[in-house]
Amino acid sequence: MVNPSDRDEQTALPLKPYTLTFLPQDVTIEVDPSVLPFGDHGQPGSILDIAMGNDIDIEHACGGVTACSTCHIFMREGADSCAEASELEEDMLDQAPGLELCSRLACQAIPDGTTSVVVEIPGWNRNFAREAPHS
């Protein structure tokens, strides 16, 4: 089986720094493209990758491979700095609760650094419980 996130058209990482604000936490991250990606949470440089790399939890049951809609977010500002959603992402968003015109999957939305970005994590997607690190 092919991993759905292993698409042919990989989106390039941003070339210049930008700010990414998470609501309702009201946390702003200064994104430095030279340290991206942080890990293996979604597409490299995705909003999910940046969030998880900065200890901002966004639920992502499928591990960020576009196989669910649990990392559903609202792009409140800067949506134009991300490539358009793929057909697969749109199919997954159709399953998301509370869908809005500005809805995206955090695992797939990769800002290009041309403008500041503000996203809102819906209440049902905020993971307030955190597992202790496994030893």
Image (tube, rainbow, N blue to C red):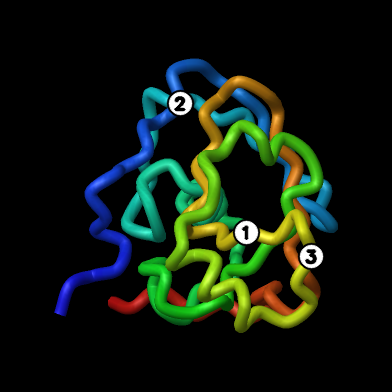
Q: First in sequence, mark 2 or 3: give its number.
A: 2
Q: Report the mark closest to the observer, 1 or 2.
A: 1
**Neighbour tally class for label 3: few under 14, some 14-19, many 20 plus, Cα within 10 Å:** few
Residue 102 against residue 44 in the figure, above or below: below
Q: How many marks?
A: 3
Mark 1 surroundings: few (<14), some (14-19) or many (≥20) residues within 10 A: many
Residue 5 vertical placement versus 69 (above, below): above
The image position of residue 93, as x and y in percent, is 60, 72
Q: Which residue lies furthest to the left in this view?
A: 1
Reading the image, the residue beneath label 3 is 100
Near mark 2 (Cα within 10 A), the count class, few <14, some 14-19 or many ≥20, is some
Locate residue 76, reporting x and y percent. 80, 47
Amino acid residing under circle 3: Glu
Residue for badge 1: 104
**Residue holding disc 2:** 14
Q: Earlier in the sequence, mark 1 or mark 2?
A: 2
Question: Which residue occupies 41% across, 67% down?
Answer: 64
